[in-house]
Image (spheres, coloured by chain):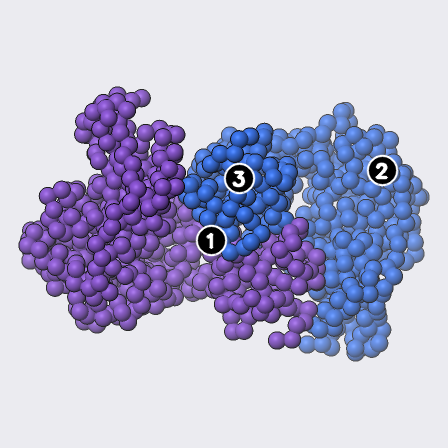
Chain colours: A blue, B purple
Amino acid sequence: MKKDVHSLALTRAGIDTYRQPVVYMREDCDLCRAEGFSALTKVGIVLGERSIVAALNVVTAADWLSREDAGLSEAAWQALNAQDGDLATFFHPEPAQATSSIRAKVYGQRLDAAACQAIVSDTIGHRLSDLDLAAFITACAGNRLDIDETIALTRAMKEAGQTLDWGQGPVLDKHCVGGLPGNRTTPIVVAIVAAAGFRIPKTSSRAITSPAGTADTVEVMTPVALDLAAMRRVVDLEGGCLVWGGKLDLSPADDLFVRIERPLDFDSDGQLVASVLSKKAAAGSSHVLIDMPVGPTAKIRSPEAARSLSQRLLAVGDALNLKLLIHHSDGSAPVGRGIGPALEARDLLAVLRRDKHAPLDLRERALDLAGALFDLIGDDAHRGRSKAVELLDNGAAERKFFAICDAQGGFSEPGAAAHRLPIVASSSGLVRAIDNRRIGKIAKLAGAPNRKLAGVLLMTKPGVRVDQGETLYEIHAETPGELAWAKDFAMAGPEPVILENQS
Amino acid sequence: MKKDVHSLALTRAGIDTYRQPVVYMREDCDLCRAEGFSALTKVGIVLGERSIVAALNVVTAADWLSREDAGLSEAAWQALNAQDGDLATFFHPEPAQATSSIRAKVYGQRLDAAACQAIVSDTIGHRLSDLDLAAFITACAGNRLDIDETIALTRAMKEAGQTLDWGQGPVLDKHCVGGLPGNRTTPIVVAIVAAAGFRIPKTSSRAITSPAGTADTVEVMTPVALDLAAMRRVVDLEGGCLVWGGKLDLSPADDLFVRIERPLDFDSDGQLVASVLSKKAAAGSSHVLIDMPVGPTAKIRSPEAARSLSQRLLAVGDALNLKLLIHHSDGSAPVGRGIGPALEARDLLAVLRRDKHAPLDLRERALDLAGALFDLIGDDAHRGRSKAVELLDNGAAERKFFAICDAQGGFSEPGAAAHRLPIVASSSGLVRAIDNRRIGKIAKLAGAPNRKLAGVLLMTKPGVRVDQGETLYEIHAETPGELAWAKDFAMAGPEPVILENQS
């Protein structure tokens, strides 16, 4: 391409703006002056067949960017598939089609199917700014999306990405709304359900803010980054799989909404439902069990909130031909002993292997969920839980789990961290509570989820009496430095295991 | 300060994120890993007595930032008053108090005085992210702020900054809601009103997106960046002044809201009213004339919208002891001949000097507004306009204008640009319209507002017949390069002066 007044050479700024495409230009560059681009302007960039809209950050005083170049954030770099020195064309973008739909919603009008499609399409195409997305999410917050709008948004999100088709017969799935630390039931449920001969092609996510996601935990034991062809092979062979959803392009707008909802710290029932069910529908599921932990510190805090959300889930599921069952579970405490990928893997393996030290709470929750799934598909007249117990206790689930791992590329036993430190009780007392946020942070400081073996192993539970000097939990780390790091933090602040005699 | 695990050395990234404090950290820096900071996390930074909350951008691949350093955007650098190498402490900030007020408003609750104060205070303290601010603005959009909330927000915005007190007697002011290109009436109105012996301590802004703001235009003729003491001296001496408001800290939250409203491209009547009246109340005004151009391409597009906004302005003005008069004017076309600081200064000087070539539309508008202000303070039984005409035509306004300039630091005659290019009609026809956006962009390409002499001089008006080869407008520039730049743009696209015979 000829270099003209609308072109600059691209350079990789190496700045992660968390998926927001940002372009960095010198304030004295001809293009900034010519186009009247100023900080926070939306700038259109064309490179070959690709085009994006990026937010402009004006570089005033740095020497890392020349007047002839435009720096791109990681998100922009990847979206354009740029190479260093590529000449790109810059333009003032027309407002995205979706901005008028968002404005209409902000002013109180309802979203129809076309509006939802425009919003989803412009979101995926990076034609909306973070501010536009925040406005959209705010305009839908609370109960401002009605059922019809929720259905339209769910459909638009589903249809914007890949949709899987598994042919005849039921396709089972599960999802947990607002996870609890250590609540790693999915691999156990998949093993039990697949052992019963049902199809459960499970996709999971990696951790966003927690010390481990299901995909992180399973990856300790077997490869999870399968493409669609490999996933199909596993499911055809074993009935179930445990793969990371990130390679499959299911409901791609969802991640982009979540990245705005998370820092805003609010969402709407409508968007939560669209998020969950668009992925399930895109994954080709027919029967979906929703685990909904309810508790004062869980995402769903009251029975009323659980009821309202459940009604909406059922109505939208109905419209998308998804048969749903909502399972309300206890959301008042963490589950199992380990926090971190390998430590959680060891918990769930212990359950599958019927180890006598296996965490009972994790086992019971997995059995509840597998049983509920059996009931949902109308199998065996509400004797689902007995069937789940049988398949776990007779070793069928264990065998199925290892068969799935073999099909995904082979099983590895989770290792143990080389560096461990017991944290002991400084006084005696009854364990009153465990601060999930602090204990999770210690696990992350120790290296989880990137260091697979790192995390925290809880040695006690609420309701248990501990003596002075008894171990409350162990910090596990892969390096001495990370161990020290986590220890310093653990020692500096309040004890995460809270004893009754403490204030 | 001892360097500990929570400290990094500050370095100036030189990136203008348009007032959003952003901190750049290496992904492999100890602090990112230790604190679990990831892209878009809010990070608290303490340096000496100052602290801010900044958005984190993680630097993945650049060599301009070391693992020991944290880069700051211009807004963060200035807010912390940082010096290169300063050791700052970093922490996970508690959510700002205002976020719960914003969330409540998002969910449909009303804002009370305390909520408005928290939102304004956390906005000024940079404790809210851009996303939080977008949510706040969205939650108030349309008519979602009622009159009481608008009053509470206006009061909170006023009280968050400096408030001026001029003592006894009326203090006059004017404001234009949604300006038109070239509508530079303010200096003329101030001169007429002050010549009548009234007090009009006028503060104005610089251009944000236009080729000139009132402060930019006045600065061509006299210093405008006066501090409060200097402003008082001028007003005590001459009754009026024409200063830039940027040094006076009047309603400081306003600019921070505007920078989010502008890219979102919507606001609310409530926020517009709070923005205008908080500044007027903080400036100590008692009588305020609001010029409200109404037209299909103006900010206020219909008589109904003008009526609704006017009612709200009057109600809030009443609550804040501001006596308001709303003047609805024709918003269908630009005003005067010049576009750009010096060119607009020459127009208004021509009016003050009663030059026979002075633009009549600018003169008439200024007289309407000055007359309306006289009527507002109840002077001379609705003969305000005659009084304004008399003060302009007898030279009193001209003398007052130069006296004000002398008091502000002396008058300079606006220069003329060294480089000019006439753009001629390629065919004959009746001028049907002038594309304000395109003509404004040509003026900005030519260098306005930073190059004071640059801009566009219109040689024709809608309704006038032009012959082929006749000059439609001149481009004025300070350098040959900028002239070429503006010319290339003018030649490349559609003619901004639209003739009747063109499609």
Q: Which residue is mark 2?
A: A408
Does mark 3 fall on the same chain as mark 2? yes
Check disc 2 and report its element: helix, strand or loop: helix
First in sequence: mark 2 or mark 3?
3
Q: Which residue is mark 1?
A: B18
Please give the chain letter of the residue carrying mark 1: B
**B30 above or below B459?**
below
Residue sitting at x 46%, y 48%: A28
Residue A291 visible from this viewpoint? no
Q: Nearer the viewer, mark 2 or mark 3?
A: 3
Quadrant in which the N terminus of chain B is drawn: bottom right
| Quarter of the figure with residue B241 | bottom left
Q: Which residue is mark 3?
A: A8
Residue type, mark 2 in image: Gln
Along the horizontal axis of the image, is A59 left or right of B198? right
Please give the chain letter of the residue carrying mark 3: A
Measure the alpha-carbon separation of dots 2 and 3.
Answer: 45 Å
Q: Position of residue B334 (x, y in %)?
A: 25, 40
Measure the alpha-carbon separation of dots 1 and 2.
Answer: 49 Å
Along the horizontal axis of the image, is A419 left or right of B315? right
**B386 above or below A274?**
below
Residue sitting at x 68%, y 30%: A163
Residue sitting at x 79%, y 59%: A455
Does mark 2 fall on the same chain as mark 1? no
Crowd band around label 3 with a 10 angstrom C-alpha radius: few (<14), some (14–19), many (20+): many
**B181 above or below A304?**
above
Crowd band around label 1 with a 10 angstrom C-alpha radius: few (<14), some (14–19), many (20+): some
Residue type, mark 1 in image: Tyr
